[in-house]
Amino acid sequence: MSTSATPNITKVGRGRTKVRFGGKARRFTGIRLLLMRAWLPVGLLVLWWLASAGSQNLYFPPLETILTTLRADWFGSAFTMHLVPSILKFIAGFLIASVLGVVFGLLVGMYPLLRAAVDPILQFLRSLPPPVLLPIGLLLFGIGPAMNISIIVAGAIWPTLLNTIDGVRSLDPQQVDMARSYKLTRFQRIRYVILPNAGPQIFAGLRTTLQMSIILIVVSEMIASTNGIGFYVLNSQQSFAVPQTWAGTFVLGILGYLANLIFIRFEARALQWQTGLRMSTGTGA
């Protein structure tokens, strides 16, 4: 008889995950963890394969055809022509947006006068939908990687920037007084007091920036580009190459999944102190 409930999944260390069902917690490692996470995606793919086998529908070709197209294109000419340029532009845009968001967020969060001065500008710019910036990017940078990267930076910087500002502002006044009493330098306050306090919020913003970067690289490549995943998907859709369109969508999903997986690993290592703190206080579940 079922006793509950939505499982609560928590990472508790390297390669270990704790899953809480109702009031009981179990730890999964290695093959058991892989099986627990993979059974549903694999099951859906098997169901899709069986349901689409022999399909004559123009828009829903057999999954076998899609996977064959994916292997032929993306492990062939499209790898260097479209995938590599998209990944490089995505990494460059995400890193620039992340660094600018954290640095500018620290400055705005630490200095109230600067925050009061730039707040109206920030509120105005963050309200602009990123696709609106595409014509401006084209005017300034023309067609090419610089335009794609600039669109990512302009559209994806906001979650990191705003979360960093909020994280800095949430610093306990007693910690500020303690830092002053120990006569810490500005760099020491940022390194040992502000960043550890704001770290969880900063990483929450970085994760959103990561997802927005993937979206924006595709959008910018669809509008004005001569290569990239977005260009491949749009070109396939306009030429009614349906298996290629599905294959490009698969590649985007895989890219987003792998990028998020790498980010989670990095976040767990960077915020390792927080996991230890939760475990020691019994709030890690």
Image (spheres, rainbow, N blue to C red):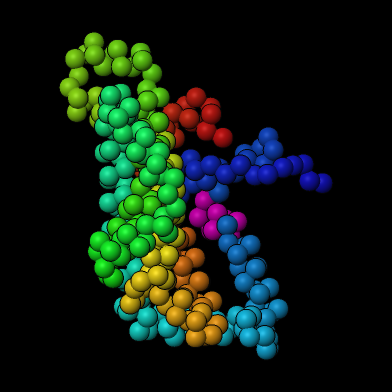
Percent x, y of residue 2: 78, 46
| Side of 79 where 251 appears, left or right | right
Identified at 31% across, 61% down, the residue is: 137
Furthest residue toward right: 1
Number of marks present in the image shown: 0
| Magenta-tinted stretch | 29-36
Q: In which quarter of the view is residue 133 placed?
A: bottom left
Q: Relative to residue 123, is residue 213 depicted above or below?
A: below
Name the residue nearer the viewer: 67 or 31: 67
Name the residue nearer the viewer: 54 or 29: 54
| Side of 196 where 71 appears, left or right | right
Q: Relative to residue 105, is residue 141 depicted above or below?
A: below
Q: Relative to residue 62, is residue 257 depicted above or below?
A: above
| SS assignment for the magenta stretch, majority | helix
Percent x, y of residue 104: 28, 38
Name the residue nearer the viewer: 83 or 93: 93
Q: Relative to residue 96, is residue 13 depicted above or below?
A: above
Q: Is residue 103 magenta?
A: no
Identified at 50% across, 71% down, the residue is: 249
Identified at 42% across, 59% down, the residue is: 131
Task: Tell me if I can see residue 164 in this picture.
Answer: no
Identified at 66% across, 75% down, the residue is: 48
| Side of 136 where 244 appears, left or right | right
Percent x, y of residue 80: 31, 78
Q: In which quarter of the view is residue 46 placed?
A: bottom right
Quadrant where the image shows the C terminus: top right
Task: Tell me if I can see residue 1 in this picture.
Answer: yes
